[in-house]
Every structure is written in C-alpha cells, then in structure tokens.
C-alpha cells in the first residue's frame, strides 16, 4: 500500500480491485444517428462562435479559476484545444462548472456541447443515459483519504465507518459494493461536491473520503 502524508491527512491507495475508472475525453449525446447528431453539435458550435464546455467545480489541477478569474487545469486545457481546432481560437470557450448530479442533464439539454467534469466511462451510462464516450483523457483509480491521526492502514479498519462520497458518482456504488462483497458495513455520507466532501472529512463528520485518486490529491 502506498501512503502519502501531509500534516493533517494521509491518502491511501487500498489493496483491492476496484472498477477501472477513467475520465471522458469527450462526451456527445448518443441517438439513433450519432453521426448526424454530432454534426449538429459541431455546426451549433461554429454558428455560435463559442464552445460550451462542462467542467468540474474548482478542483485544482483539473478545473479552477486563478486569482485573476482565468480558468486553468487539465479539463480546461482540453476544452481550449478543441476550441482552437474548431474555431481557430483557444479562448472562444464558455466554461460551465457542474456538480456531479448536474453533469448529464446539462449535456442532454444542450446546456453544454462537451462534457469532461471528471466523468467516468461506464457501459451503464452509455446504455441508460444514451451518451457516447469517444475517447479517454485520463486513467485513474478510486482511493480513500483519512486523517493521519486515525492511523488507518486497511479498508477492513473502516468497517462500520461513515465515509464521505459525492452523490451520483460511480464512487458511491463501488464503495457500497466492495464493503458488501467483503461482509462489512459502511455508512455513505452523500455530498454535493468534492469541496463539501473534503470539508466534511476535515470537520470530522466522516472517517474517510473516497473519490478518484487525482481528486483526492487535489483536495488535500
């Protein structure tokens, strides 16, 4: 087990096989004629002269505003690259920060043209939500963050614990499935955003916070 410590917290990568997770490079609405639909989205971007890009809510390294209000991060850079390719100008982007529960509704209602927002590629989302994941921007894995003072070394020590997790994410389902499969109990504390989940951990409202490893590193 790899452990990374700070003054107050330590992030642990658990010894367990979790569902492989990856952020979507680009998500487009999937309909019966996806090529026609994709063309409509592309034509809309060109006629508008601006790309509307759904990104994470202020996660350092992924999507956040600096002191001058300028957007920076991996998701932001990719959005600007698409704008440069389609509109010949990397600044012709409207960044739309989205909470996890608002990501797919924003895409389906055309509030955004592209969705990144730390979104995991799953077959269920493709089949049920009817979205298409053309490629991958980032490979990541689910991890857990606990207070260093708790001296938690394994997930078995979190049996019966309250664990903070973002609502509407694959993290929630994987968390519950893993503990159930190993005959342990867990009390998920559902939070609306990564910031709120991290704040709840720091405030002692939960014994651990689970999310993508990259997100946990950013929230430390």
Image (cartoon, rainbow, N blue to C red):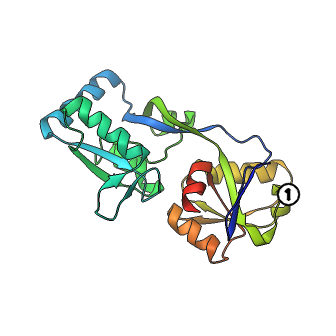
Q: Quadrant of residue 148?
A: bottom right
Q: Residue at x 45, y 50 (%)?
A: 62
Q: Is residue 186 visible?
A: yes
- Closer-to-camera residue (48/152): 152
State left or right for residue 213 relative to residue 51.
right
Q: Is residue 10 toward the left or the right of residue 67 in the image?
A: right
Query: How many marks do you count on the picture?
Result: 1
Where residue 161 appears, x then y in whole percent? 77, 67
Residue at 25% across, 29% down? 85
Residue 27, above or below 163: above
In the depicted view, which residue is nearer to us: 110 or 86?
86
**Mark 1 — residue?**
156
Query: Which quadrant of the structure image shows residue 190?
Result: bottom right
Q: Which percent across, then down, holds residue 102?
A: 41, 55
Q: Residues within 10 Å of mark 1 (few under 14, many from 20)?
A: some
Q: Is residue 109 visible?
A: no
- Left or right: where does residue 138 sit relative to residue 102? right
């Amino acid at each position: 087990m790899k452990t990374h410590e700070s003054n107050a917290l330590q992030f642990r990568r658990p010894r367990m096989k979790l569902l492989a997770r990856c952020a979507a490079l680009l998500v487009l609405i999937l309909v019966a004629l996806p090529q026609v639909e994709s063309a409509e989205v592309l034509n809309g971007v060109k006629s508008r002269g601006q790309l509307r890009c759904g990104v994470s809510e202020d996660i350092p390294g992924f999507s956040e505003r600096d002191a001058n209000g300028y957007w920076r991060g991996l998701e932001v850079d990719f959005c600007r690259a698409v704008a440069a390719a389609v509109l010949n100008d990397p600044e012709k982007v409207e960044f739309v920060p989205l909470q996890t529960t608002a990501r797919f509704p924003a895409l389906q209602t055309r509030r955004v043209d592209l969705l990144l927002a730390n979104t995991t590629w799953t077959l269920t989302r493709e089949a049920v939500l009817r979205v298409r994941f053309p490629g991958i921007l980032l490979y990541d894995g689910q991890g857990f963050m606990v207070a260093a003072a708790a001296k938690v070394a394994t997930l078995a020590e979190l049996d019966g614990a309250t664990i903070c997790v973002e609502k509407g994410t694959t993290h929630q389902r994987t968390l519950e499935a893993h503990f159930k499969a190993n005959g342990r109990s867990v009390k998920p504390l559902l939070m609306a955003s990564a910031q709120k989940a991290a704040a709840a951990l720091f405030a002692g409202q939960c014994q651990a916070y689970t999310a993508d490893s990259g997100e946990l590193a950013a929230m430390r």
